[in-house]
Image: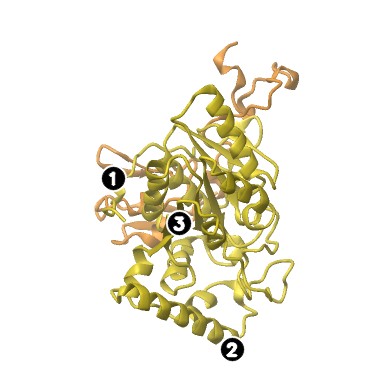
Amino acid sequence: MSKILKPKDIPEEEFILSGTRACSGCGLSLAYRFALKALGKNTIITVPASCSTVLHGMYPCAAVNLPMLNTAFESTGASASGIRAALNILGKKDITVLAWAGDGGTTDIGIQSLSGAAERGTDIIYACYDNEAYMNTGTQRSGSTPFGAYTTTTPSGKKQRRKNMPKIMAAHGIPYVATANAVYPIDLFQKFRRAKDEFKGDTRYIHIFSPCPPGWGFEPQDLIKIGKLGTETGIWDLYEIINGKFTLNNITMKIVQGKIKRKPVVDYFRAQKRFNTLSNNAIRRIQEEIDKKFQEYENSFA
Amino acid sequence: MEKNKYKPWRSIPDDIRFEDLPTCPLAISDKGSIGNTGEWRTFRPVINKEKCTKCMTCWTYCPEGVIYEDNDELFIDYTYCKGCLICYSECPVNAIEKVREEI
């Protein structure tokens, strides 16, 4: 990735107007703020039912200073395709279409319309902010909930593994797939800038890890710590898949190169109440899987 | 149509009826769409101007975007600051203190 920016290089203009409905210490709010700063004011957003609809506010008020179309849960991809088709007919080429959906609206309910849009190569940026459950309706299990996590529909911890959505999107052959973490906002900003500027004309997909204080069971002030632990323990890797070529970046690359020491996963699990039911044996198994994954990374990147 | 007619619901004057609002459900963006979210706070983050190095870490991590720079100094907009204290726990020089709100 090109040179790493500093906070002073980020545009000052805010598109999220303060006083939103998002919870205090919301990871989504932080990621959204920087994504919109990267895309700029020539953007049309489409949002399905999710926490971001809550953030956007209720008629006749809106909290985001950009045009936004609310859509049904399953049709984010279709809605974004429709906006792009309308812009093409009007001859407006310089407008970015952003589809911004949660993990439920992407991995479970909206996967068919997203897959359709990616297969057609529609000129949109699709961003999924992943808070690992249906947080908007009170923490129900989604396809992206990790193994062992408590939700109201998995009271003793989820028994199944999670879906690897960025890899599913990469299998569509789209030119740009990236993962980001809400607590590395500058890395996230650069990925959105890159998606906007370098890969115009095709579907681009960014998957954002977005910690949620009430749903995951930690104090709002620990948002940054929990999010950073996610990447530093190797649970959430930061990578880009550009035209099929897989590259690690930021912290994950530094861990693989040996510049930063990887932390044990138990730190991440024991900092959150949702993993209270996860046994030490299960954590040991997860640690082994992550060690194996990093061994593979080291073989191909170090 | 006057521009100020369709302000957010809090500021709609009593003499405008619901039927007078536009037929297309088009929301207008403004600060404080849920009201003054500063009322949610238990603790108030206070910047110590002497210790502050203006590294902008708090500005970067603020989910609400209430920290702003004016005349080379950082300020917090207490009308909308929700008091999540991310700035307090992330400040690299501990220049932000937390003070309990009083009623």
Type of amino acid under label 1:
Asp
Choose between A8 and A261: the one closer to the eye: A261
Residue A263 in picture, x, y percent from top left: 41, 78
Which of the two discs, 1 and 3, labels the residue nearer the N terminus?
1
Residue A292 in picture, x, y percent from top left: 46, 82
Q: Which residue is mark 3?
A: A178
Quadrant in the picture for residue A39: top left
- How far apart are labels 1 and 3 at the CA level? 22 Å
Q: What is the chain identity of the residue bearing mark 2?
A: A
Left or right of A89? Residue B93 is left
Residue beneath the point at 27% across and 53% down: B55
Q: Which residue is mark 1?
A: A9
Residue beneath the point at 69% across and 17% down: B16
Choose between A82 and A288: the one closer to the eye: A82
Q: Which residue is mark 2?
A: A281
Task: Give the quadrant of the C terminus of chain A.
Answer: bottom left
Residue A140 in picture, x, y percent from top left: 70, 62
Q: Which chain is yellow?
A: A
- How far apart are labels 2 and 1 at the CA level? 45 Å
Residue B95 in picture, x, y percent from top left: 31, 57
Choose between A239 and A51: the one closer to the eye: A239
Q: What is the chain identity of the residue bearing mark 1?
A: A
Q: Which chain is orange?
A: B
Would residue A58 be visible to someone looking at this image?
yes
- How many residues crowd mark 2 within 10 Å: few (<14), some (14–19), many (20+)? few
Element type where label 3 sits in the image: strand
- How far apart are labels 2 and 3 at the CA level? 32 Å
